[in-house]
Structure formats: C-alpha cells, structure tokens
Amino acid sequence: MRIFITGAGGFIGSCIAEYLSRRGYETAIYKRSKDGNLSPDGIPENVDVIVNSAGRLGTPDVDSTELMLSNATLPKMLADHCSKKDIHLIHISTPGVTGLSANASEDSEYNPWGEYESSKMVGEINLREHEDLPADRLTVLRPDFVYGIGDLHKLALFKQVSKGWMPLIGRNGAKIRPTFAGDVCRAVESALPGGILNGGLFNIAGPDIVTVRELSSEIASALGQSLRIIHLPKVFFRIALNSGKLCPDALSESRFQLFGKDHYVSTEKAEKADFYPEWDIKRGIGETVSWYLKNGILP
C-alpha cells in the first residue's frame, strides 16, 4: 500500500509518516514550501491513500486567507483528486470545530470557537458534502489535545511547569483529554482501507480525562520536581490579557480558553468500532519529557 502524507513537516504529520514507515507501508511525503502550496500535479502517481495532516494554526503572523487555503481549499482539492483516482482520503481535523464543550460527540453541531477552527470546519464540510467522494473512501479524524515526541505547540506548558510553579484558572483548571501522538498514528493506520475506522467521522482521544492541575502534576513528576500550584480567578487572567505589552508571552486568548473551560470529546463511536487508546497520560508524558530533556529543550 502506497500512502501520500501532506503536512509531513509538522508535528502530527511527521509522527504519522514515521509511524507508517516503521509499520512497513510505502510512504511519500509533502512538506509545505514557503513559495507555494500543493497542486494536483504534485501528488505522486499510484498512491492508494492520501493522509491530509496539513494545516495552518491561527497565529498572529498567519492571515485568514492563508488559513482558508491550507485548512479548507487544500482538503477540497485532495478530495477532488481522490474521487477522480478512486483512492482513499484520511483527513485530520480538530474537535474545535464543535467549540469548547465537555463530552462533545461527532454529532455535536458545528460551533467553531476561533478563526483556525472556523477554517477547519469549512474544510470538513467541503469533504463531507463532496458529491463524488464515496463515504467509504473518506475518514475524518478529530484528535483531541495532541502532545508527544516532537511537539513544540504544548512546550509552553511544559516550560512553565519546569519553573516549579503553575498558575491555574480557578481551583483545578479545565478538564481536558490529552492524546499522545502515538494513538493518533494508530488511528490513521486503523482508517486505512479495510481498517476498523475506515469510512466515517471519529473523535480520537487518550484514555484519561484530567484537570490542568492533574496534567501539570504529571509533568512535574516526570521532571522529578515539586510543583507549586497558584490558584487565580478568571478575572486576573482577563486583566492580564487586556494589559497589552505587559501581558506575559505565555498567555494568550486561546490558552486562556483552552485551560479555563472544560473541553473534551467522547470516544464512544471509536470504541464501538473497537479502537481504544494505548497511551495513558503517565506513559505519554514520560516519553514526551524524556524527548524534551534529551534534545535540550527543557533544562
């Protein structure tokens, strides 16, 4: 089976590419170039599956046009190609398309909470409403709060814990469901033709629903240090966000939302298909911290 993987220069895409290669699949990868996006001519011939893990995050240096090109237009182009070539498409989306809510299911209504999530929603809709791509040739995966080896997006959290103290919104912070990248890779393999997740929309998440306090304590334990928890009301963080240049670099509106409001998915649908995560939070955090330390990313 030959698999083409977009977004292989990013965290999740590179993990998927490495995992599938180790599992014996023939892979071809695409790393987004600075001078242009992928065109149909850039897709290799004779591929059986396209895994689309490409996407742009909503950072200050990324405008709305680029978000839509990467997160909505590209998936549509890949779907067009797959329909013409009769090949499978596995698309990596995000639970954020249904907003920040507890126990969100695949049937939850679209309610994106940010510009990035809005563009991912359009990408999903473009695929799910595609007239010429059969349902059994499309799988959409929504992995929840992904972390792991190679991840730099959640690094700010690990760095904060490494300082020995952690500010929390409220008593314990939000409830979240961290997902180790290895389980996302397993889900992609399960979505390949003939797999238990082939065809449909599935939430993917780790086995543990934890508070930000519990997650921070697990990171501290993996680092072998004590952690001082500082409880602060939401109004304090809101004032800090509105302080302009005085706002700490580690604090942003998205982090305020992510760590201040319960948001995690239900994985009942994936479990009914007999897919279960293998990486609990202790094991996953341990592997991640070890990688950070080995590469000098954490002191």
Image: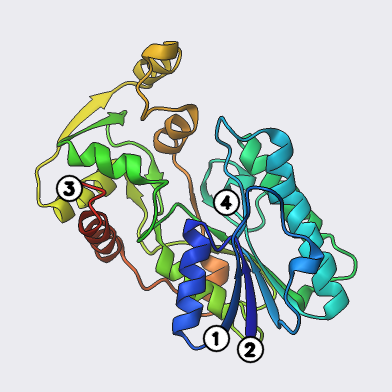
Task: Return the mark for residue 25.
Answer: 1
Mark 1 touches mark 2? (CB < 8 Å): yes
103 to the left or right of 36 = left
Q: Which residue position holds label 4?
A: 95
Q: In the rendered structure, which amino acid carries the disc numbered 2?
A: Met
Q: Position of residue 239 (x, y in %)?
A: 40, 13
Identify residue for label 2.
1
Nearest the viewer among 54 and 131 is 54
Q: Residue at x 42, y 11 (%)?
A: 243
Structural distance between the alpha carbons of marks 1 and 2:
6 Å
Q: Residue at x 46, y 74 (%)?
A: 18
Q: Residue lying farthest right?
A: 131
Q: CA distance from mark 4 to mark 2?
A: 29 Å
Label 1 or label 4, whichever comes before in sequence order: 1
Q: Describe residue 50's horizontal placement relative to residue 184 as left or right.
A: right
Where is residue 1 shown, x and y percent of the image?
63, 88
How far apart in space, not on screen, are marks 1 and 4 (Cα)?
Answer: 28 Å
Q: Secondary structure at mark 4?
A: helix
Q: Is residue 284 visible?
A: yes
Marked residue nearer the N-terminal end (4 or 2): 2
Q: Residues within 10 Å of mark 2 (few under 14, many from 20)?
A: few
In what element is the residue under mark 3? helix
Check disc 3 and report the residue beneath it: 220
> Residue placed at 65% from the left, 78% from the top?
198
Q: Nearer the viewer, mark 1 or mark 4?
A: 1
Q: Given the image, on which type of amino acid does mark 4 rest?
A: Pro
